[in-house]
Image (tube, helix red, strand yellow):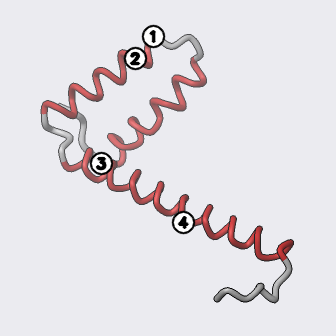
Amino acid sequence: MTAKPKMPAEMWMPLVLMILGFYTLFALLTILKARTIILQRERRTQWVRELVQAHTNSVEKQKWPLIRGLILSQWVIMVCMSGHAMD
């Protein structure tokens, strides 16, 4: 384990960085999916309604419509894909 690697650093350093990047991306996507599942499961509860309302109010105050649309899109997709309105 303490021996010098046979592969040159020009090859193994990018490989290690890509592996770490992949694990980071995987962890991020797993957390985002878990958040979406929780929000879909709890969509009829008061705390989710308050969260969506607070998010909607903060997005409406933003100046740039493109940014507002990108931020709001994940919430719209979540509600639309669930097949139920937030009532």
- The structure residue drawn at horizontal position 63% and vertical position 70%, both measured from the top left corner, is 19
- The structure residue drawn at horizontal position 50% and vertical position 63%, both measured from the top left corner, is 26
Image quarter where the N terminus lies is: bottom right
Q: Give the CA distance from mark 4 to mark 3.
A: 28 Å
Secondary structure state at the residue bearing disc 4: helix
Q: Which residue is mark 2?
A: 58
Q: Which residue is mark 3?
A: 82
Q: Which residue is mark 4?
A: 23
Q: Give the CA distance from mark 4 to mark 2.
A: 32 Å
Q: Nearer the viewer, mark 1 or mark 3?
A: 1
Dot 2, crowdedness within 10 Å: few (<14), some or many (≥20)?
few
Residue type pointed to by label 4: Tyr
Secondary structure state at the residue bearing disc 3: helix
Residue type pointed to by label 1: Lys
Horizontal side, residue 83 vs residue 58: left or right = left
Secondary structure state at the residue bearing disc 2: helix
Horizontal side, residue 46 vs residue 39: left or right = left
Q: Which residue is mark 1?
A: 61
